[in-house]
């Protein structure tokens, strides 16, 4: 399974979630008034809905922040085996958490908020990946992520079988329509050559992509070498088929760019888009429209 973000990367986010729920100074009023400080508890994390489980490593991190005395162990299979797996099994047990009952009850909602969200993103991604099986296209995410959750949500996309677009504005060059809005079409190729040359000189391995809205813009982009990918923005399938043909004819380039479809992609349209021959399909809905997976933390009353 692809690498999960580290505790160092996530600690601040977990701390913010804890403070948001417990306040400052920390106080779970209900547990404090009802539960003995000495009481111990046991709870089972249960997957209640078909889907991809994702985010199990964060349980240990959350328990570490809340109370070092909380312990996490597998309920059946090892956690690293369960992570990223799809299940239709009703009420699949995932993990067992034991320790001070007050701490366990206090951490419950934050644990579930993270796990449900990440599993929802992974499940949504898997549905898109499954929808284009047998084509040469691959599903990519976008930067349309929940603020503060980008590392986690992009991990969840990978967990669901998708791939990550650039992590942020800092790790890739993407010349979008708003960047070139003031450039006349006859001048577009020259302007792109300049920025590509500057970028390659500055960082030879940096990913470079340009966005085009029309086939005329694509023709200009295909005059420029050393572009990794060209993003076809909101084109219909017949137009994308023409774009693929134009790209395939650009044999004079030393680097033939991949083509990425973007805009208006959903589970109804994604298969037809993949069958146009594009290489990549970016889907904002992987993250901005994912529905939380139903996962519960069932307390053992014994």
Image (spheres, grey):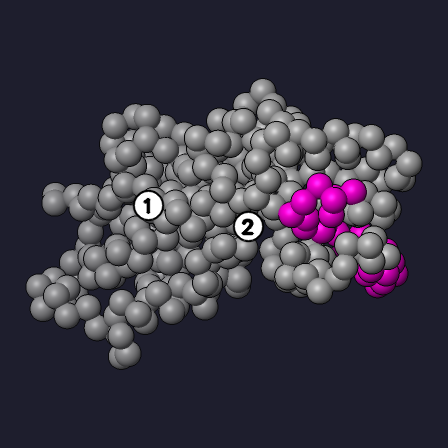
Tell me where residue 32 sits by quadrant. bottom left
- Mark number, residue 292: 1
Question: How many numbered tags mark residues here?
Answer: 2
Residue 58 makes an appearance in the image: yes
Instruction: Tell me if mark 1 has few (under 14), some (14-19) or many (20+) residues whose alpha carbon lies within 10 angstroms of its own.
Output: some
The residue at 40%/63% (across/down) is 14
Closest to the observer, 114 or 218: 218
Whole-percent x, y for residue 48 in the image: 26, 35
Instruction: Name, please, the residue furthest toward the top.
Output: 134
> Would residue 43 appear left or right of 176 to someone viewing this image?
left
The residue at 71%/44% (across/down) is 230
The residue at 70%/31% (across/down) is 242
Is residue 196 a member of the stretch shown in magenta?
yes
- Extent of the magenta region: 191-219
Instruction: Tell me if mark 2 has few (under 14), some (14-19) or many (20+) residues whose alpha carbon lies within 10 angstroms of its own.
Output: many
Instruction: Name, please, the residue furthest toward the left.
Output: 34
> Would residue 127 appear left or right of 260 to someone viewing this image?
left
Whole-percent x, y for residue 102 in the image: 20, 61
> Would residue 131 appear left or right of 117 to someone viewing this image?
right
Q: Quadrant of the C terminus?
A: top left
> Would residue 289 appear left or right of 220 to someone viewing this image?
left
Helix, strand, or loop for circle 2? Answer: loop
Is residue 138 a member of the stretch shown in magenta?
no
Helix, strand, or loop for circle 1? Answer: loop
The residue at 21%/57% (across/down) is 105
Closest to the observer, 104 or 141: 141
Tell me where residue 66 sits by quadrant. bottom left
Q: List the residue tagged with mark 2.
A: 142
Between the residue at mark 1 and the residue at mark 2, the CA separation in whole angstroms equals: 19 Å
């Amino acid at each position: 399974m692809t690498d999960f973000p580290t505790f160092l990367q996530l600690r601040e986010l977990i701390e913010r979630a804890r403070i948001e729920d417990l306040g400052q100074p920390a106080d779970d009023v209900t547990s404090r008034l009802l539960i003995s400080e000495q009481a111990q508890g046991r709870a089972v994390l249960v997957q209640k809905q078909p889907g991809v489980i994702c985010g199990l490593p964060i349980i240990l991190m959350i328990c570490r922040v809340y109370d070092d005395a909380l312990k996490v162990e597998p309920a059946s299979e090892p956690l690293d085996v369960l992570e990223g797996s799809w299940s239709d099994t009703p009420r699949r047990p995932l993990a067992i958490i034991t320790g001070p009952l007050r701490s366990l009850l206090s951490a419950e909602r934050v644990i579930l908020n993270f796990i449900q969200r990440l599993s929802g993103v992974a499940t949504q991604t898997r549905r898109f990946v499954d929808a284009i099986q047998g084509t040469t296209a691959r599903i990519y995410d976008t930067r349309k992520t929940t603020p503060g959750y980008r590392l986690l949500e992009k991990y969840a996309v990978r967990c669901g079988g998708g791939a990550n677009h650039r992590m942020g504005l800092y790790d890739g060059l993407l010349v979008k329509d708003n960047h070139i809005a003031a450039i006349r079409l006859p001048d577009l190729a020259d302007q792109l050559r300049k920025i590509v040359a500057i970028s390659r000189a500055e960082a030879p391995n940096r990913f470079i992509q340009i966005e085009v809205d029309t086939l005329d813009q694509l023709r200009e982009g295909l005059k420029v070498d050393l572009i990794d990918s060209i993003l076809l923005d909101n084109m219909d399938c017949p137009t994308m088929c023409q774009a693929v043909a134009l790209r395939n004819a650009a044999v004079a380039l030393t680097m033939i760019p991949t083509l990425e479809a973007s805009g208006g992609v959903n589970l109804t349209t994604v298969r037809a888009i993949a069958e146009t021959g594009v290489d990549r399909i970016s889907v904002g809905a992987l993250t901005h429209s994912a529905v939380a997976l139903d996962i519960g933390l069932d307390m053992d009353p014994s």
